Image: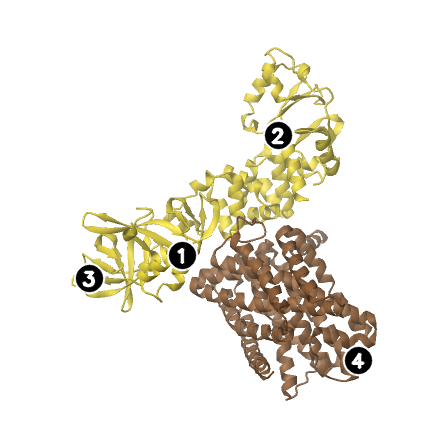
Amino acid sequence: MAENLLYLTELVGLKVYDLKRHRIGRVKDAALVPLIDSARVDRFLVGGGWAWLTVRHDQVRSISLDGIYLRDELLTPYHSDEYMLRLVRDLLDQQIIDVSGRKVVRVTDVTFEIRKDEDRDVLFVSEVDVGMRSIFRRIVQGLLPRRVVRKLQRPIPPNSIRWEFCNIVEADPQRRLRLNITHRMLEEMHPADLADIVEELSPEDREAIFTAIDSEVAAEALSEVDPKMQASILESLGTEKAADIVEEMSPNQAADVLAELEQETSEEILEEMEPEEKTEVRELLEFEEDTAGGLMNTEYVALHENATVSDALEALKGNEELLETLNTLFLIDGEERLVGVVPLARLFIASGPARLKELATDTPIQVSVDEKQDRVTELFDKYNLLALPVIGEEGKLAGVITADDIITVLRQK
Amino acid sequence: MLKRFRYHIAVFFSVIGPGFITAMVDNDAGGIYTYSQAGAKFGYLPLWTLLPITILLIVTQEMCARMGAVTGKGLSDLIREEFGLRVTFLMMAALLLTNLTNIMANFAGIASSLELFHVSRYISVPLGAVAVWLLVVKGTYRSVEKVFLFASALYVSYVIAGILVKPNWAEAAIYSVRPVMMFDTAYITIVIGLVGTSIAPWMQFYLQAAVVEKGVTAKEYVESRIEVIVGCIAMAVIAFFIIVACAGSIWTVSPRDIKDAADAALGLRPFGDYAYLLFCAGLFNASLFAACILPLSTAYTVCEGLGFESGLNQRFREAPVFYWLYTLLVAVGAGVVLLPQFPLVRMILFSQVINGVLLPFVLIFMVLLVNRKGLMGEWVNPRTYNVVAWIAVVVLVGLTLALGAITLRDILAR
């Protein structure tokens, strides 16, 4: 098993021999061309004399700790190529995202697998190494013979991440395209995990990720990021992209983020948004942050007091994007005044033609928009609420505060 | 207009912390000893050094804060990314050793300050160590930072102590701006000592990491820079009052060498119990403060550089290396001080020498990094600033090497 493994630290400095077994030079770096193959080492960069030479993977006959033997001597001089991911320059000592472990790690070494392809050896990147064993290897490599290092490192437990689960962060958008780096894996993570990862990166890398991923995912992740960082991320993105992301956020979270920004910037972003979302967010921005109005969300489902259970089901079908978190329906009269609150679960045990009014809770608890935040949290605790309707001018239903908003408030204290 | 101004004030308060705390911790047990010694032996004469020291401090600290704000990465991160693992490893090993001696020096400070209150070091040091450990491991980052900022305020005790001994203000004012150079080994030693104790390697790592942790961005950097400068000036003001307090008391009676910082406090006694008590309290506070920050900063820096999970936001199981290293630094730092016959003062002196040995390397890496266009973009040093930075590096390197040599000679001579 160990025979077909090679570490990047061992590869660097390995001697390269031509057909007549004369030494040409030593390996300086190895490069992948991700557009062709995301794991195969495509070129070896060999330093000998003044210039670096490029050895293509199909020019190699065998690779082992004793050196690299070529089967073709027509080598070209190395010139910088934007399509190459150079392992020593671009990967070693840099931060990458471990998607399966959901964290940011620093690359200490790379493990290759040597595979036989007919009569020649091909290197494939199999793992990225982090942790003690690779640190030990990095430090002593070059001071002791390679085989001795392998023996000495044995007692230290390895710590590696499979190459498939590594997500490289590249700040330059041009190069990102050329290197074929996508953030598909990140988009599939839970937004809260993605938010944790993003918080650990530098501002530049953060910006790169938010620019590259889908706006909807970006919005969900951004909602989970620390408020102060939210503002700096939005500021670093272009106004257009920022507006796209803010649009996808729920209006109250959008308002919270925009409130953190400088007025000019938040105005610019608002201007870019769709008219409907813009008005909602603008209204929410009017309220003081620590009042019921500042906490509330304008995404809720309200029906006329005479509506039936089937009407309610119909209304829910029209609001599918809210279903994941929805737990309460509101009943309003002709003047939009709140007259009742219906827990969603009661719909399941009622028949279609039944009136919603009959399912409503006896006395709905409600607050006005300018109620203080402390009082609001008190009400949630006292009445064990999941959602609390907020009443604006003339007794009209203005919005709703949900339990997860309250948890956020309490956590920030 | 007013709104913009209010915005800037708000940003200033949101970035306050890193620069201020770093500058305050700089006046740790070793610093207080050196300032007291300067005042007790030479009175008001060495006061002029504070001005150039402040400038040097601002130059180095500003570069770190700028790198932190622009790159969003710690100094050890950058060294790792730009200079590779082996260099980083050597650097971290040296920093670990250096900071360990600094931690010992500060636990020694805790011991000697509380011994003036008749508290045995066998009680004060273990209690101090446990308190420090719990504060960081069990408290959340926010409360920790508030505690530290509050502790900064306690340094005012030195200002009050300085006023209480009724020094000669006219002389103090004159010698603050009139450079006096004497070719007297003791005097030169103290001048070099003043510089060496004020600019230490750990500060660069701590400040940059703290700026990053705080989430300061390039946009808010203007406010952060002001905070760094204010912090450095505050540090110099406190140093001024320590020197003046000792000059106004010990030196006026009879100029002499002091054994340690606690000895300086005793010298203040004839000038009133309050001055004495405040000086002791200040020493205790400074030592405890530094004993908190140093192990934390060291564990942080080393883990970042070598790529282990780190940070107070992680739990023990998520970042074992970080917490074990932290625990070990506190335990060893405090434990050594409890050894019978442990030479407290010599430890403080030794920590200064070893600081001086490491500092040149750190500074050179810093100036190299801050000039990399790829990292800093438009925020690289302007040319004139670079001249100042390199002069600062050369001066500091020269002085700290000289300090190292002299202190080493003293240690060997004892």
Residue A166 in the image: state x and y as whole percent.
41, 47
The mark closer to the camera, 2 or 4, is 4
Q: Colour of chain A?
A: yellow
Q: Colour of chain B?
A: brown
On the rendered structure, is B352 left or right of A125? right
What's the mark number on residue B170? 4
Up-down relation of residue A382 to residue B65 (above or below):
above
Q: Are marks 3 and 1 on the same chain?
A: yes
The mark closer to the camera, 2 or 1, is 1
Query: What's the distance in space between the residues labelled 3 and 2, CA to CA?
Result: 70 Å
Tell which circle, 2 or 1, labels the residue nearer the N-terminal end: 1
Q: Are marks 2 and 4 on the same chain?
A: no
Query: What's the distance in space between the residues labelled 3 and 1, CA to CA?
Result: 31 Å
Q: Does dot 3 land on a helix, a strand or a loop? A: loop
Q: Quadrant of the C terminus of chain B?
A: bottom right
Residue type (three-letter) at the residue carrying disc 3: Asp
Query: What's the distance in space between the residues labelled 3 and 4, CA to CA?
Result: 82 Å
Label 3 resides on the chain identified as A
Up-down relation of residue A256 to residue B305 (above or below):
above
Q: Are marks 2 and 1 on the same chain?
A: yes
Query: What's the distance in space between the residues labelled 4 and 1, CA to CA?
Result: 63 Å
Q: What residue does disc 3 label?
A: A18
